[in-house]
Amino acid sequence: MKKSSFFIGLASGMVILLVAQIALGGFFSLGRIAQEVIPKYTNHEYESFETKVEDVIGKLNTYYYEDIEAEQLYEEAIRGLVDSVGDPYTTYFTQTEYASFMETMEGSYDGIGVVVSYGETENEVVVVAPFKGSPGEKAGIKPNDQIIAVDTVDINGMALDKIVELIKGPKGTEVVLTIIREEETLDIPIIREEIEVPTVEYSMMEEDIGYVAVSSFDLVTEEQFNNAIEELNNQGQKGMIIDLRFNPGGYLHIAYNMIDELLKEDLLVVYTVDKQGRRSELVTKTKEAFDKPLVILVNGSSASASEIMSGAIKDHGLGTIVGETTFGKGLVQQTIDLDDSSAIKVTVSRYYTPDGDFIQDVGVEPDIYIEEDYEDDVDNQLEKALEVIREQIKQ
């Protein structure tokens, strides 16, 4: 990133921030922050950065044709400061955004366990599917049900996230969905429960080949993954396919724990290096390793923690990587809480595979490259993975 673009972005954020400071009665000293972040303002026409900002704010207050919403300006000012770093993974979360983000990463929430989406238009909200065993499924909610009201509140024209918030609520409480099903209008009462989002799906395929699809690395994923492997082993699996396609990643420590169940003891899984050059390593501890043929399926949407898993397995030769080159995200983020329950997510280090590969913008190359092609509704990548693992089982 060019130095000039950084200061342009930073200055934009500071301008907005001063508006919020003036309107809200002053949250902090802009002058002090300006002096710390920009030690010397070089434009000779103004005595200081703060002086120019005050001039701009004065003109903005004089000429802008509408009233300024101070709270919105405050939030966007902070967002502008964080965005000015120029890193797409370094972001700011408002209180609401942070709560939603953490709920997603935890993999559990209080609600009815139903996935909803817009239908043919944004004025139509339909059920994609209820989770298996969820309160929604038990109450009789079915795919393609059109939701028209929540607790008698008409949702026509309402944003999808607002509708989801209406449906969620404390466990043990009731919510009534009004739906249309085959031209019949029904009121369906549902008691909310704690919902654990299924991030792992598994099945036993023909010839006793286990199949495990991991959609993300959330807090609930490790237990779901271990349960899947245990169940497939109990069913007598002779080999296993782990499908990481379209998995955007998640928690590093969850990915490490899952890899620890596959690799033998004392093997390097991943190491990170921060801006001071400090190296941190994650090494396996579990003595027992997965001792059957293993194939990892990846594609261009397999990112971050997915690449840590596939990279470790590839470098240690535990399994065969099949599919397409992965996304290429070799950066680690840390979420830092702020005093008002908002947060910033900051890129804090680079990570490297056991062989020392930094995969940012490069990705993990598969051992067997095959592009996705669903001709005649056949998953050709999965078919290739089955072909590979069958050969390994025979050996």
Image: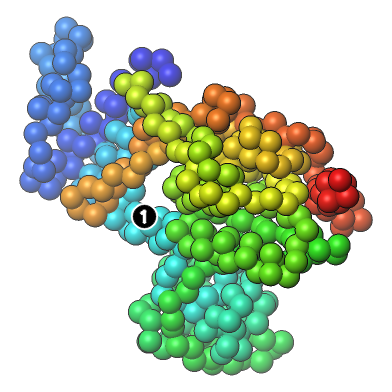
Q: Is mark 1 on a helix, strand or loop?
A: helix
Quarter holding the C terminus is top right
Horizontally, residue 44 falls left or right of residue 220, namely: left
Q: Which residue is more in the foreground, 87 or 357?
A: 357
Query: Quick check: can you spot residue 68?
Result: no
Identity of the residue furthest to the top in this view: 44
Q: Position of residue 167 (x, y in %)?
A: 45, 77
Horizontally, residue 278 falls left or right of residue 14, namely: right
Q: Position of residue 256 (x, y in %)?
A: 49, 46
Is 275 situated above or below 120?
above
Query: Quick check: can you spot residue 245?
Result: yes
User: Which residue is drawn at the image coordinates 41% and 15% (left, top)?
Assistant: 2
Q: In which quarter of the image is residue 59?
A: top left
Q: Which residue is more in the foreground, 207 or 114?
A: 207
Identity of the residue furthest to the front in this view: 287
Q: Where is residue 105 in the image (x, y as percent from the top left)?
A: 44, 56
Q: Residues within 10 Å of mark 1 (few under 14, many from 20)?
A: few
Is 151 situated above or below 73?
below
Residue at label 1?
Answer: 97
User: Which residue is drawn at the image coordinates 55% and 31% (left, top)?
Assistant: 353
Amino acid type shown at disc 1: Glu
Q: Quadrant of residue 235?
A: bottom right
Is 283 situated above or below 250?
above
Quarter holding the N terminus is top left
Q: How many marks?
A: 1
Q: Where is residue 220 in the image (x, y as percent from the top left)?
A: 48, 62
Image colouring: rainbow
User: Which residue is drawn at the image coordinates 46% and 31% (left, top)?
Assistant: 271
Q: Quadrant of residue 43?
A: top left
Horizontally, residue 90 falls left or right of residue 380, namely: left
Q: Which residue is more in the foreground, 117 or 293?
A: 293
User: Which residue is drawn at the image coordinates 27% and 39% (left, top)?
Assistant: 77
